[in-house]
Amino acid sequence: MLSKGWTNHMNIWAWRTSDGQPHLGISETADATKVLDVTQVEPTLVTLDDVWVRWKSVAAIYEAFSHWLSLPEPRVRLERVALTIPVRLSECWAAGVTYVQSRDARVEETQAAQQFYQDVYTAIRPELFFKAPGSRVVGPGDVMGLRRDAQWHVPEPELTVILAPGGEIFGYTAGNDLSSRDIEGVNPLYLPQAKIFHASASIGPSIALAPTVDPHALTIELRIRRNIHEVFAGSISTTEMRRSVRDLVGYLRREWPITGWTALMTGTSLVPPTSFHLQEADQIEICITDIGTLVNTVRRIGPDWVDVPEYGD
């Protein structure tokens, strides 16, 4: 549902060409085959930081980009390029237990204190937690990590809010709040370890400009493939989210000034059954209406991949 005065849907993309050069683009749909290369039109605009420095508001950016989309400039296909996160994040936060499915799953997995999850689902104050520094959030096509000290990992597909410097809601993207359910299940106080580990957060592939979409009328789909076979699939509508996006953002901004680009994952609703555990090389696809499909694979964290010590060091 478009806001008054916003006549076109708009997605923002980022990618690197074969020579490693970054590019920024826009499209009128979540289709990555018809993208206007903004960097080709204006070489000084390579990142959203460049765009924000020039216009400093969502409305002004929309007006400028709408003009460019009306030009007869050629469109490019982003099929043979490396898609990247469209913005340089400073932080990534997440919300929990915002859907009844998440509440029920947490109650089922937790060995004690199930009442905490039942209470936070209905409480006025939401559950919010820090997920990752922006530099540790991975993007489309990247590999995500599985903890070596846990066995029960699941993806958590989430509509993700992108906040501009100062806290204005800039847009929406897809997010994966990869989690270790067995660690959190032992004790809710282990939540940080269940949520924060190497490459446990991913967002992308595009950012839908905020006033051009209704965040509470989108469909989220999750598909997991193992050796080309689909081992889990599900979908749900964000109409089932108990809390509003603005409410979650409002609580995040309480006593926490937004000083850089920030991502806020709004909670998961698609929870694989307790018998399901992610395995190395599983492919995760998260598709959200008007945003596109975020694809990542997973592997165990180890010193052959990243500089982490062996156990006992």
Image (cartoon, grey):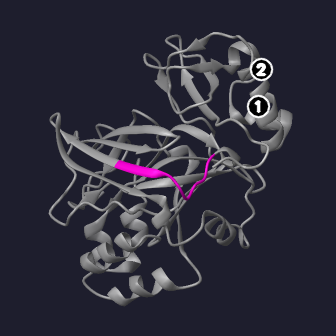
Q: Residue at x 60, y 53 (%)?
A: 214
Quarter of the rendering containing residue 7: top right
Q: Residue at x 28, y 87 (%)?
A: 112
Number of numbered callouts drawn? 2
Q: Residue at x 70, y 34 (%)?
A: 48
Q: Is residue 300 visible?
A: no
Q: Are marks 1 and 2 in contact (CB under 8 Å)?
A: yes
Q: Is residue 199 left or right of residue 266?
A: left
Q: Which circle marks residue 44 in the picture? A: 2
Q: Amino acid at mark 1?
A: Asp
> Magenta includes 216?
yes
Using the image as rendered, state which of residue 227 and residue 218 is in the foreground. 218
Q: Amino acid at mark 2?
A: Thr
Say which residue label 1 marks: 50
Q: Which residues are magenta?
A: 213-221
Q: Magenta part mainly helix, strand or loop? A: loop
Q: Compared with residue 144, is residue 78 higher up or lower down, i.e. above or below?
A: above
Residue 180: give x, y in percent of width and height: 31, 62
Q: Compared with residue 151, is residue 74 higher up or lower down, i.e. above or below?
A: above
Q: Residues within 10 Å of mark 1 (few under 14, many from 20)?
A: few
* Distance CA(mark 1)–CA(mark 2): 7 Å
Q: Is residue 10 left or right of residue 140?
A: right
Residue 26: give x, y in percent of width and height: 64, 27
Q: Residues within 10 Å of mark 2 (few under 14, many from 20)?
A: few
Is disc 1 placed on a helix, strand or loop? Answer: helix
Disc nearer the start of the sequence (1/2):
2
Q: Compared with residue 307, is residue 242 higher up or lower down, i.e. above or below?
A: below
Residue 100: give x, y in percent of width and height: 39, 74
Residue 197: give x, y in percent of width and height: 40, 56
> Magenta includes 138?
no
